[in-house]
Amino acid sequence: MQGIRILVVDDMPPMRTFVKAGIKTAVSKDIEVDEASNGEAAKGKLQLQRYDLVLCDWNMPGMKGSELLQWMKEQEKLKDIPFVMVTAHNEKDIIMEAIKLGVRDYVLKPVTVDALGSKIKAVLMEAIARKEKEVK
């Protein structure tokens, strides 16, 4: 999975560290993992770099994960980047809202390395297959 870039967005530094380590352990050491501490910082990074996946906390101070996702869907070059929400909320209405907004998948907190790895692998494989189909 060389050349893959993931953006981890979470307002809690320990969570960002855990997710980054989990990606390197459960998915691939070759994946480049970047991080942002909030939605506004993520917007800045998304405008400067290409990412293959965004993992984002749903509830953050300032710009919420839902607002970041809505903004991404409005940007032509960002709208197809898979977005996986990471949340402690497992209420059906919140998950349904996220799906309506275009979330590709979600991971419930507390996150385990295995759950994180399997979700990321599935989303990345789908994205890689879509890219290969577009090239043909």
Image: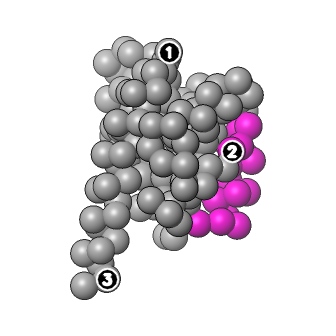
* Residue type, mark 1 in image: Pro
Q: Label 2's element?
A: strand
Marked residue nearer the N-terminal end (1 or 2): 2
* Residue type, mark 2 in image: Glu
For label 3, the crowd category at 10 Å Cα-Cα, with few meaning under 14, some 14 to 19 and many 20 or more, is few
On screen, 18 above or below 73?
Answer: above
Quarter of the image with the C terminus is bottom left
Q: Which residue occupies the foreground of this view, 25 or 20?
A: 25
For label 1, the crowd category at 10 Å Cα-Cα, with few meaning under 14, some 14 to 19 and many 20 or more, is few
The span from disc 1 to disc 2 (Cα, nearest Å) is 19 Å
Which label belongs to residue 35?
Answer: 2
Q: Which residue is drawn at 46% across and 27% down?
A: 113
Residue 76 image point, x, y percent: 49, 70
On screen, 125 above or below 102?
Answer: below
Per the rendered image, the range of residues in magenta is: 35-50
Please state the total of marks drawn on the protein image: 3
Q: Quickly name the residue at label 1.
A: 110
Residue 59 image point, x, y percent: 59, 25
Q: Label 3's element?
A: helix
Marked residue nearer the N-terminal end (1 or 3): 1
Q: Is residue 120 visible?
A: yes
Q: Quickly name the residue at label 3.
A: 135
